[in-house]
Amino acid sequence: MRILILYNIAKVLKKGVETDLACEQEITIIVPLVEAILKDKGYSVSTMGTDFNLWEKLKTRKKKTDLVLNLAEAFGGGNTNETLVPEMLEALEIPFTGASGHNMHLTLDKEKTKLVLSHYGIPMPKHQVFRDGKEKLMKGFKFPLIVKPIREEASIGIYHDSVVSSRKQLYAKVATVLEKYRQPALVEEFIEGREISVGIVGNEPEITLFPALEFVFPEAKSPLEQIRSYEYKWGGKKEQMIRADLQRKTVKQLEHCTKVAYTATECRDYARMDYRLDNAGNVYLLEVNYNPGIGPNTHGLNNTLTMMASFVGLSFEDFVERIILTAAKRCGLS
């Protein structure tokens, strides 16, 4: 099988703050590793950056490519326009792994995701969207609250000071999100408790859920810092990833919510759902993550989905091929 790996190296900041570019750099490690793995497994592999000539390049490569492994998390050397990559592939009818353009647009928008999944009874934190920073906080909200950009992933825009305990802190953080990220701010009730993630690979009717993973934050000074903030994910603070020890009832609820969210938002091939588990054991879905990182947990990297795969005995190398084979089967490729 002839595989083309697409990737983007973000060097130009289009939105956010300068430190946001740090999360874009691990792709320089992952792409050569994945290329070598697939070549060792007998695939014909090439790579291509998603620069502004991508459309023309893809047209010339269409007949030479059986499947695209889409690892591009942005387009054109910046940190924006990720959805353009699958949309180009769809327009050119080139098979590719992971999220469709539609799935990306839906799940990137945390408010729209909530609206869809609330219809299916998925429990989520109470929320309000601030579009200009002048909105009044709705009645019934209790501090602490957490403030997030509404259309970001990879913990971008979520810092320790994103958890606020007063109206003054709330409106200051909302103003920062509006100014720096040029998008609405999502405000949620903060769920004090445990940070849990569940991975999934496959397509109906062959879907596999990985055992739940828990993030532990030994450096956190309070429960309000026990979140997978940018400081923990990319800023050098140390988090731990462990197999979650959960009651069977909780495991069943997580599995149900993960399957429903995966299907309802039209995820493909692989994804990851992030949750909070409060001190009473109640489950709350935070986010649907399409195309989660599939890098190793070596070379200074921490990749949640790869760690989950290891819980069921899948090595990094075999997990990468599992994604290729899953997408190939969905696309009708031998």
Image (tube, rainbow, N blue to C red):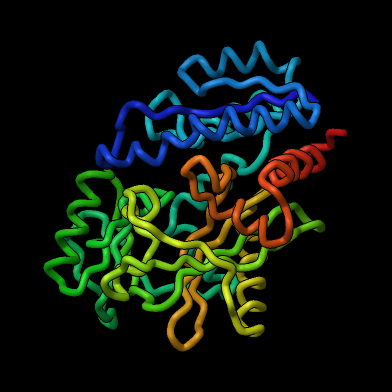
Q: Does 201 sit left or right of 23 as displayed?
A: right
Q: Quadrant of the C terminus?
A: top right
Residue 213 in percent (x, y) is at 56, 66
Residue 330 horizontal/vertical position (percent): 79, 43
Residue 183 at x, y percent in the picture: 30, 47
- Residue 226 occupies quadrant: bottom left
Q: Is residue 278 above or below residue 36?
A: below
Residue 110 appears in the rendering:
yes
Q: Residue furthest left?
A: 168
Q: Residue at x 57, y 72 (%)?
A: 244
- Tell me the residue at 81%/58% (across/down): 205
- Quarter of the image for residue 12 reads top left
Q: Is residue 149 visible?
A: no
Q: Quadrant of the N terminus?
A: top right
- Is residue 256 toward the left or the right of residue 166 in the image? right
Residue found 47% across the figure and 57% down from its top = 112
Question: For the view shown, which residue lies furthest in the right direction?
Answer: 334
Q: Is residue 167 above or below residue 54?
A: below
Q: Position of residue 298 (x, y in %)?
A: 54, 44
